[in-house]
Image (cartoon, helix red, strand yellow):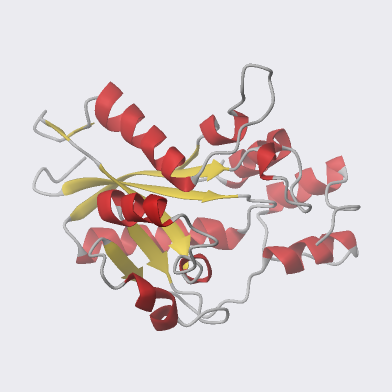
């Protein structure tokens, strides 16, 4: 950490990442620029946390494939890391365990703030890191629905940790997405460019043998070499 006057910030993006797209990586870049320039935070860590196979979504390929794709996607970056805790978490019988978003944030909080003692600044002092969720507005718009998000979990996610929301103009109006969440003061709105990246569309393009431009080249090569998504519902 270079500026000891700032608060260290760790961004965590949870999701299926089936497959991971260029937009997922760009969200980190946009959020980091916003945080470093317009807040009292300094980004010290950016993590992808793929869900486990217990998520049971029809379009979900096995966790080991998604972890490899995420690793390939960030291979040429120096900032984004892939955390396998959520994806590989299992019970005593070896069956995958589903982790909620608050479970994942607590995992990072414990690992960074409790076990490591926080983040070391340039002057040698350790400071507690702010752990924050990174989402697109298309995810944020679902947070006002108690059938989708447990209100108790949401209270901890937005009350204790916080969230950076990247605009998705082509999918969701940011003001509509954030209106039900106005009582929380740990929400930061990140401006974005116009984009229409859709995982559903990407899976359909792969299945139909079409050219795919929204995935990192190494991820496309991996998908094709392993025949992923050919028989998976889009």
Q: Is residue 177 left or right of residue 3?
A: right
Picture quarter with the C terminus = bottom right
> What's the residue at 45%, 40% (across, down)?
104
Residue furthest top as drawn: 92
Between 102 and 16, the one nearer to me in the picture: 102
Residue 55 in the image, given as x and y percentages of width and height: 66, 44
- On screen, residue 75 above or below 93: below
Image quadrant assignment for residue 37: bottom left
Q: Please determine whether, in this image, residue 214 is positioned above or below residue 77.
A: below
Query: In this picture, is 85 found above or below 3?
Result: above
Q: Residue at x 22, y 31 (%)?
A: 118
Q: Residue 129 location in percent, x, y? A: 24, 40
Total number of numbered discs in the rendering: 0
Q: Is residue 104 visible?
A: yes
| Residue lying at 47% horizontally and 50% vertically, measured from the top left | 13
Which residue is located at x 69 percent, y 63 percent? 199
Residue 133 can be seen, yes or no: no
Q: Position of residue 36 (x, y in %)?
A: 25, 58
193 left or right of 219?
Answer: left
The image shows residue 231 at horizontal and vertical percentages of 91, 52
Quarter containing the N terminus: top left
């Amino acid at each position: 950490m270079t500026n000891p006057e700032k608060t260290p910030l760790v961004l965590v993006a949870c999701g299926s990442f089936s497959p991971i797209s260029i937009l997922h990586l760009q969200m980190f870049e946009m959020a980091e620029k916003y945080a470093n320039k317009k807040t009292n935070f300094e980004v010290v860590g950016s993590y992808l946390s793929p869900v486990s196979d217990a998520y049971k979504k029809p379009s979900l390929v096995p966790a080991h494939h998604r972890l490899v794709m995420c690793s390939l996607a960030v291979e040429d970056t120096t900032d984004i890391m892939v955390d396998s805790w959520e994806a590989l978490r299992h019970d005593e019988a070896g069956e995958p365990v589903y982790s909620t978003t608050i479970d994942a944030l607590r995992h990072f909080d414990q690992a960074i703030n409790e076990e490591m003692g926080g983040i070391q600044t340039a002057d040698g002092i350790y400071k507690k890191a702010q752990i924050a969720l990174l989402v697109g507005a298309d995810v944020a718009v679902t947070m006002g629905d108690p059938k989708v998000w447990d209100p108790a979990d949401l209270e901890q996610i937005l009350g204790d940790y916080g969230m950076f929301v990247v605009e998705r103009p082509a999918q969701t109006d940011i003001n509509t997405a954030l209106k039900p969440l106005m009582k929380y003061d740990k929400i930061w709105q990140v401006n974005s460019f116009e984009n229409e990246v859709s995982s559903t569309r990407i899976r359909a393009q792969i299945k139909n043998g079409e050219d795919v431009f929204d995935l990192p080249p190494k991820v496309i090569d991996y998908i094709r070499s392993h025949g992923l998504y050919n028989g998976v519902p889009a």
